[in-house]
């Protein structure tokens, strides 16, 4: 089906062939369509530093020559699948901005699919049929600047990689039945976003089995899974997380690892954040079953779980170096986790009921009408009428003429109280003053 796009750029259909490493050697994130036009005008190389960020490997080939000789969609072919089927090995396929309602299959191919307008304007949307939006089987494929959306059915991932290798740069995975999956593969995600994906069982954003997966500078936000890893699930193989943020991921029916679940895998974390992830059983941020983990300079904040808000290591060799976590160490980490230098931060519990404020609000045990993270029962109530001061002011029940968030009547009473105390002090001082000789 033809994409819905305007201002399509046409490029000649020749192809420049070259060998590629498993990870791919052509990494390019585009600031916009203007950079692509500069390619055509032969002026890009002179202004590349300002127009785009490129890897060192790019400069070992002629970018201008590569792009001039690439295949374009829909310039040369109407659909992506047509271009993939016709392209020789090592081809670059330029994908113009638009919505492409199709599912693509790349089997034993070495190709580069490049959304020249970036993921914000180039979307590959599933056609409603069960299965992944993009399936890679063997070979070595690179995707740049493409959004994968609308994968449906139990296996409806945004992208699925089986065997071989794939690299995703500046891509987005939105509203799929799981963002991406890898099986017996090597997959790298750079500067990618995973948002609002829902997996049946494991890995709301990424599910990995017997694979080596890297996420570098990615955002994994508001994804969910049934049982294992609301954000990422990795069984065997390895998972490396570099400066990657997990925010608001959760498990729907239980049980382990609101942000990350790893089983028998080698885990390495460097930097990054785990915030507001939730598990109904254990390991609000991470659950590690067997395997090993090295976690450096990561931040754990506001994760929710009945046991071990930050990390639960079960039969795993886990070492945490630096970084910070909220709550007492016994609440944040399970027994056996070796912690070296991680800073433990107090977790707010304003009503001192033993339940952190964030958890009490998240579970509906306390209300937070103004969304400031403080239960309404802890809000200022200077006149003790059981209505928070800000509610009285917002609804006009009380006056706040100076707009300082405090009821004027309470400030007046406070001033009168201070004045009375001052007068009392003066009177007492006079009575206690020694008589003149």
Image (tube, rainbow, N blue to C red):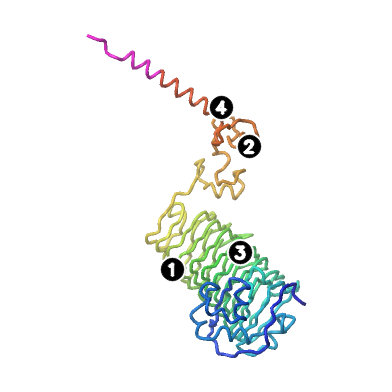
Across and down, in percent, residue 365 comes to 60, 45
Q: CA distance from mark 3 to mark 1?
A: 24 Å
* Residue at horizontal 63 percent and vertical 75 percent from the top: 116
Q: Is residue 107 above or below residue 256?
A: below
Look at the numbered disc 3 and give the secondary structure of its residue. Answer: loop
Span colored in magenta: 424-437
Q: Residues within 10 Å of mark 4 (few under 14, many from 20)?
A: some
Residue 252 visible from this viewpoint: yes
Q: Which residue carries the number 2 mark?
A: 394
Q: Residues within 10 Å of mark 3 (few under 14, many from 20)?
A: many
Q: Position of residue 135 (x, y in %)?
A: 66, 79
In the displayed structure, 425 sits above or below 50; it is above
Q: Earlier in the sequence, mark 4 or mark 2?
A: 2
Please check the rendered image and state whether residue 430 is part of the magenta-colored stretch, yes or no. Answer: yes
Q: Is residue 362 left or right of residue 350?
A: right
10 Å crowding of disc 1: few (<14), some (14-19), many (20+): some
Q: Quadrant location of the N terminus?
A: bottom right
Callout 1 secondary element: strand
Please report contact status of discs 4 and 3: CB closer than 8 Å, yes or no: no
Residue denoted by label 3: 227
* Residue mark closest to the camera, 1 vs 4: 4
């Amino acid at each position: 089906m033809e994409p819905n796009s305007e201002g399509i750029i046409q490029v000649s259909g020749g192809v420049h062939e070259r060998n590629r490493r498993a990870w791919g050697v052509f990494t390019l994130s585009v600031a916009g369509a203007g950079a692509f036009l500069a390619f055509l005008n032969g002026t890009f190389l002179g202004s590349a530093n300002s127009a785009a960020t490129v890897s060192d490997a790019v400069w070992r080939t002629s970018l201008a020559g590569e792009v001039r000789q690439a295949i374009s969609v829909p310039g040369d072919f109407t659909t992506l699948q047509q271009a993939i089927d016709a392209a020789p090995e090592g081809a670059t396929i330029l994908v113009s901005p638009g919505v492409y309602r199709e599912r693509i299959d790349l089997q034993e191919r070495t190709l580069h699919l490049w959304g020249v307008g970036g993921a914000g304007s180039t979307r590959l949307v599933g056609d409603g049929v069960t299965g992944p939006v993009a399936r890679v089987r063997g070979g070595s494929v690179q995707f740049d600047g493409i959004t994968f959306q609308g994968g449906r059915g139990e296996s409806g991932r945004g992208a699925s990689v089986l065997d071989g290798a794939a690299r995703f740069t500046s891509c987005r995975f939105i509203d799929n039945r799981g963002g991406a999956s890898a099986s017996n593969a090597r997959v790298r995600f750079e500067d990618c976003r995973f948002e609002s994906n829902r997996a049946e069982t494991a890995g709301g954003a990424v599910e990995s089995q017997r694979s080596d997966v890297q996420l570098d500078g990615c955002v994994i936000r508001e994804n969910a899974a049934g049982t294992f890893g609301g954000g990422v699930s990795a069984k065997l193989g390895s998972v490396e997380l570099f400066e990657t943020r997990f925010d608001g991921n959760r498990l729907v029916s239980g049980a382990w690892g609101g942000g990350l679940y790893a089983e028998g895998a080698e885990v390495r974390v460097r930097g990054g954040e785990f915030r507001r992830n939730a598990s109904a059983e254990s390991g609000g941020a991470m659950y590690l079953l067997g395997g090993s983990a090295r976690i450096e300079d990561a931040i754990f904040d506001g994760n929710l779980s009945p046991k071990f808000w930050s990390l639960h290591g079960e039969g795993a060799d886990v070492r945490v170096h630096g970084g910070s976590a909220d709550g007492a160490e016994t609440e944040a980490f399970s027994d056996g986790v070796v912690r070296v230098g991680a800073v433990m931060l107090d977790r707010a519990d304003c009503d001192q009921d033993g339940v952190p404020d964030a958890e009490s609000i998240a579970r509906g045990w306390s209300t937070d009408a103004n969304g400031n993270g403080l239960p309404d029962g802890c809000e200022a109530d200077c006149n003790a009428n059981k209505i928070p001061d800000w509610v009285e002011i917002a609804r006009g029940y009380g006056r706040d003429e100076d707009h300082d968030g405090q009821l004027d009547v309470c400030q007046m009473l406070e001033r009168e109280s201070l004045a009375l105390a001052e007068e009392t002090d003066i009177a007492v001082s006079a009575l206690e003053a020694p008589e003149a000789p």
